[in-house]
Amino acid sequence: MSVLAINGGTPVRSRPFPAWPVWGDEEIKNLTEVVKSAKWGSLHGDKTAALERQFADLHCAREGVCINSGTTALQIALMAADVEAGAEVIVPAYTFIATATAVIEVGCVPIFVDVEAETCNINPVEIEKAITEKTAAIMPVHFAGRPANMDEILAIGRKHDLVIIEDAAQAWGAKWDSLPVGAIGKAGVFSFQSSKNINSGEGGILLTNDSIVAKMARSHANCGRSDDGEWYEHFYYGGNYRLTEFQAAVLLAQLQRYPELHKIRLANLEYLNEKLADIPGIEICRPDDRISDHACHIFVFRIIPAEFGSKSKNSIIHALQKEGIPANGGYSLPLYKQPVFLNKSFGRRGKSVDFPIDYSAFHCPVTESLCNDQAIWLRQNMLLGTREDMDDIVNAIRKVKEQAHTLNEKIS
Ligand SMILES: Cc1ncc(COP(=O)(O)O)c(C=O)c1O
């Protein structure tokens, strides 16, 4: 076997993977239309409304409300779904910070629970254990574009009378048991931030089948106005969380090219799963017939450290990068270990506040081992590559595994 590139050998590849974002004439045409229309805000133009309709239809949801980011859409979802301040909201420990800070932002208390190693999604058994008389909501994340187990989450929600808000920030078009995610629970939220498979730099959308949630979300995002009220009539608490028509113009074009790009990503995700399943020491995510569609935002796999000479995850990732594979380690800490939670820095200028939960007491072993030792991510743009690109990924992983004994850094 050849010498690792990190030790002076020849890398598996030196070509870059496909760049992101992918864009073309359609984005430019739509943007030009908005510029020339002189209707640049969603209060005046029609592109945001068109996007809301198309995106909701794609997800079999009755209503869509565009919001300026996934983060603010999560906050608005919690408010619109009437999750009272002070209530506990169950979230996975393995997720992006916004899932939890949105909960803080609306005056609620995030309770972190562990995920399943085989799916990286919230573990329903751990949800049950975390429920108290203060629990009001569960916020599952469809991590990487793979739907969480909505059968069990909905059943728990029904049993304990809890609101389910789906954090579908990474899961455009994903389907659980043939049903698109987003409006399976009370409401769901998607992100259009730069790294996302549908991208307008920043942006988000909330989906729901509940007309009151939709009405309140629309109002909270639009200064507390009402669709049938006047411009200077403010009925409810709200801010300006609107999308611009420029973003909607780009998103309408991105939405059009989504099926074609999705087909490529999905075929490559399935190919990688098949090839990597044959490598001892690599664990791919557990297949599940109920994943009717995977949004392929991240290709995540786990390494079994003992099979990689007990070398650190970082040294393996570094070796892969030197082979020309831009792998990364993803979330490096369970959210409860972030300084903001340990120090309860939820006050003005980062001041610590009185808070009912001590986050230093949390321990989610699966999340900790995903973060520290096991999970490796490949981003969605890599899945837009060719079959040869995917073979390079597989070959580089094989090479690093076989030569792992030549790496320096052991697990500490
Ligand atoms: C799981 C998850 N939730 C929420 C968000 C927040 O979305 P945004 O960046 O649009 O605010 C993200 C974005 O990365 C995310 O990955």
Image (cartoon, grey):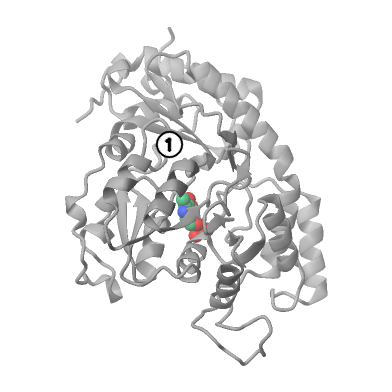
Name the residue furthest top: 1
Structural crowding at the residue carrying mark 1, measured as other residues with C-alpha within 10 Å and reported as few (<14), some (14–19) or many (≥20) = many
Q: Write down the quadrant of residue 376 in the picture.
A: top left
Looking at the picture, how far across and down is residue 13, in whole percent? 55, 22
Residue drawn at point x = 53 percent, y = 23 percent: 273
Front residue of 312 and 140: 140
Side of 100 relative to 293 (left or right): left
Q: Which residue sits furthest bottom?
A: 232
- Picture layout, residue 287 above or below residue 181: above
Q: Is residue 200 left or right of residue 239?
A: right
Q: Position of residue 307 (x, y in %)?
A: 31, 16
- Quarter holding the N terminus is top left
Residue at 77% from the left image edge and 70% from the top image edge: 46
Q: Residue 271 lies in what quarter of the image? A: top right
Where does the image place residue 175, in percent across and percent down from the top left?
Answer: 60, 41
Q: Which residue is mark 1?
A: 328
Residue drawn at (43%, 34%) of the image: 119
